[in-house]
Amino acid sequence: MNKRLRTISVITLAIFLVGIIFVTYSIHRLIWFSDIIFFFSFYVVLIVLVVTSILFFIGLNHARSISKEMQKKYFINSILFFIIPLILATSVVVFDQISYANYYTFTVQKWRDASPNERGRLIDSFRRTYDVIGMNLEEVENLLGIPDYDDDSSYIYNLGDYRQAIAMDPYFYEIMLNEADVVISDGIFQG
């Protein structure tokens, strides 16, 4: 492989790897922290893909001037250099999502120790696991503890930002009760 083709290949790979690392980190931040930096990564990815595609095709065009055997090696190496980092990045993201789901699986102890923002991440797991409709007040308190706010007909738990990057007002989980202190409905609202 001649020097110019090798230089183009190295630059292309470097740009592509930086883009993949940034996107993987941005997705990690979005999963764990609802970080807004992810929204900007789309443009970085677009630029990286355009630049690497241009450099890749410049390299392929230049490769026409070398032997067929060298063209084949260049093409195979280029594909491997693109596919392997993509597979690794995808694996990291999938593992990150699994870790997040395990970490934010509802337990009574996690809920009681959680801040309002952490409760916002636990509430979906709670709602998938428990159907509170039909439960009495004691059963609800055994699971969620004493509410942050309550009156005769509802229990309200603060969920903080509830998976939002930026929430102007906090979110709340409200459990509506009938006269016999049995849950008749539940829901999440921003207030």
Image (spheres, rainbow, N blue to C red):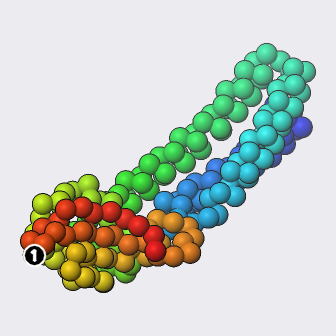
Q: Is residue 100 above or below residue 67?
A: below
Residue holding disc 1: 138
| Residue 134 lies in quadrant | bottom left
Give x and y (percent) for residue 142. 13, 75
- 179, 130: nearer the viewer: 179
| Residue 115 lies in quadrant | bottom left
Quadrant position of the N terminus in the picture = top right
Q: Is residue 121 above or below residue 49?
A: below
Residue at position x 59%, y 44% from top?
Answer: 85
Give x and y (percent) for residue 2. 86, 33
Residue found at the very far top of the displayed protein: 68
Q: Is residue 103 above or below residue 85?
A: below
Residue at position x 90%, y 21% from top?
Answer: 65
Amino acid beneath label 1: Glu
Helix, strand or loop at label 1? It is helix
- 32, 13: nearer the viewer: 32
| Residue 26 lies in quadrant | bottom right
Give x and y (percent) for residue 150. 26, 82
- 128, 59: nearer the viewer: 128
